[in-house]
Image: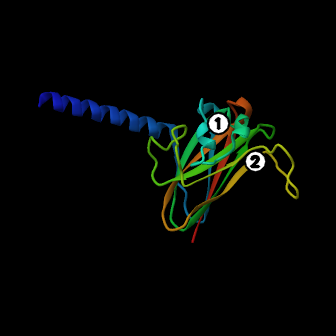
Amino acid sequence: MKNLIVFCAIMFFICSISSAQINDSLLWIKAEPGQTVSVKGDLANGFIMKDISWAWNSAVACFPETQVRKFTGNHVLYAVNLPARSEMEITVTPTDKDANFSLYAYEVGKIDKNNIVPNLSSCIRCEAEHKWDYKKRGQTQDHTRTVKDIVAINNPYQVIIGVVGAEGLQKGSFTLNVKLNSR
């Protein structure tokens, strides 16, 4: 019986540490319906993600493997709640207009250690934006990156946002804007 108590105590401790590590890698944003929240950040506070193959997994489909170089710098992760009957628009604006940033955001039911990148095996939706390889007819691109179509219809979700330096970029300040519209 004593061994069982010691085992349970050790498992509780390990689970507590794992939970703390998950929460430490995410910066939570509190978004209010009908408002835009702005957060300042820096890629220097992020980390290099060695394996980003989760992004082109068919159950995620965030961006194709051909765009991998645009997601090789430091990743800074944010989390935000998305209420039912809401939509979100997320924009990152680098302070240096010449800095090459990328952006992704994905929806999950509830954030846990199994659905935070790079451990993401599936999600409800994932959207990404990066510097274009070619011009798009009728559109121009500047240094900002925006993802749209982050929506919740009947169920609330949680959203993880990744601000990333392209082509190995590991530092650079930015402003992240999260606009939440609810019906």
Amino acid carrying mark 2 in the image: Thr
Crowding at label 1, few (<14), some or many (≥20) Cα neighbours within 10 Å? many
Number of the label disc, if any, that sits on residue 87: none
Alpha carbon of mark 1 to alpha carbon of mark 2: how far?
A: 15 Å
- Which of 32/123 is in front? 123
Residue 106 locus on image (x, y percent) = 58, 50
Residue 56 locus on image (x, y percent) = 63, 43
Which residue position holds label 2? 144
Q: Secondary structure at mark 2?
A: loop
Query: Eyeballing the image, is 7 above or below 115?
Result: above
Residue 23 relative to residue 178: left or right: left
Residue 16 relative to residue 34: left or right: left
Which residue position holds label 1? 42
Amino acid carrying mark 1 in the image: Asp
Residue 114 locus on image (x, y percent) = 46, 42
Answer with the quarter of the image where residue 32 lies.
bottom right
